[in-house]
Image (tube, helix red, strand yellow):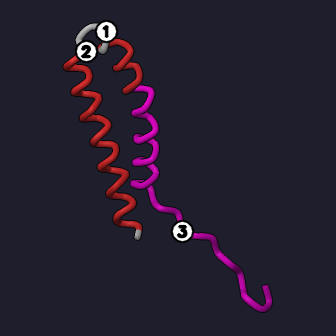
Amino acid sequence: MATFGVVRGEHDEGAAARAFQILLVAQVPIAGYFALTWLPRAPRPAAVILAIQLLAALAAIALVFALEG
């Protein structure tokens, strides 16, 4: 510590980033429940909704990676 001082870790990303991460993970079981209940009842509309959900999640993840670098 005498040579380099106190090394601080990286700063926390903030509440918005933490909420984004929690919501991204929370949508997996919700989408799974939706798939289990609605795919047998109405396969085509449910598949469209699931595809839109997947594209929205991929777009959000891609945006995070694009803004990081």
Q: Quadrant of residue 16?
A: bottom left
Residue range of the region highlighted in magenta in the rendering? 1-30
Near mark 3 (Cα within 10 A), the count class, few <14, some 14-19 or many ≥20, is: few
Identify which residue is drawn at 23% across, 11% down: 42
Mark 1 or 3, closer to the camera:
1
Looking at the image, which residue sits at the far top? 41
Instruction: Provide residue 29's location: percent of width, then percent of height.
Output: 44, 27
| Helix, strand or loop status at disc 1 | loop
Identify which residue is drawn at 72% across, 86% down: 5
- The amino acid type, in three-letter code, at marker 2 is Pro
Q: Which residue is the site of mark 1? A: 40
- The amino acid type, in three-letter code, at marker 1 is Pro
Vertically, is 16 above or below 40?
Answer: below
Earlier in the chain: of badge 1 and badge 3, it is 3
Q: Which residue is the site of mark 2? A: 43
Q: Which residue is the site of mark 3? A: 11
Identify which residue is drawn at 33% across, 43% down: 57
Q: Which mark is residue 68?
A: none
Vertically, is 11 above or below 56?
Answer: below
Give the CA separation, mark 1 to mark 3: 46 Å
